[in-house]
Amino acid sequence: MKKSYWGMTTTLVVCALLCIGGCKEDQKKEPLSAIPDPVAVEGQNTTPKPDDSDGQALFQQHCAVCHPGGGNIINPLKGLDGETLAANGITTVGDIVDNVRQPGPGMSRFDKDLLSDRDAGCIAEYILQSY
């Protein structure tokens, strides 16, 4: 009886280890941010054009906590309305993206690892169109 108990226990342990460990080799999964954007093929851009909702959703995800309604809870003199942005030398999508990458005091920095150029551009377009 003891032999069959140990034999069955050993078999169950081996089966459990195979199920837990799997039979395949380990596959390294890359984060989505590491996957390159589609490459243009024969002059055709295969990257889908972002729509306005992309910028709004990304703004809500990354910016709205400190900039609710286009304001600024850290420094009210640095809101996102066009007049205030222009007074601070920020008038283009590129200016906003540069400011996100190299912000002034009080603002968190958003590197490319945290926010892709495409997403930063979508947010910048949303800001310029909305505030």
Image (tube, grey):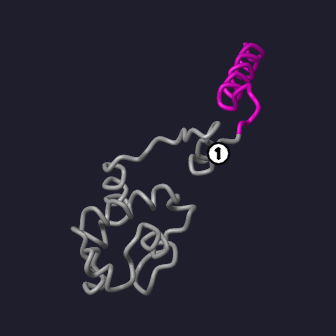
Quick check: 64 left or right of 27? left
Q: Is residue 15 magenta?
A: yes
* Residue at 64 percent of width and 37 percent of height: 42
What x and y, as percent, mark residue 2? 74, 17
Q: Nearer the viewer, residue 8 or 81?
A: 81
Badge 1 local density, few (<14 within 10 Å), some, or many (20+)? few
Circle 1 is placed at which residue position?
30
What x and y, as percent, mark residue 95? 44, 74
Quick check: 29 left or right of 53? right
User: What residue span does the magenta drawing correspond to?
Assistant: 1-27
* Secondary element at image label 1: loop
Q: Residue furthest left?
A: 69
* Residue at 70 percent of width and 32 percent of height: 21
Q: Is 36 situated above or below 58? A: above
Q: Is 115 situated above or below 98? A: above
Q: Is 23 situated above or below 126? A: above
Quick check: 44 left or right of 79? right
Q: Is 55 situated above or below 77? A: above
Which amino acid does the dot numbered 1 rest on? Glu
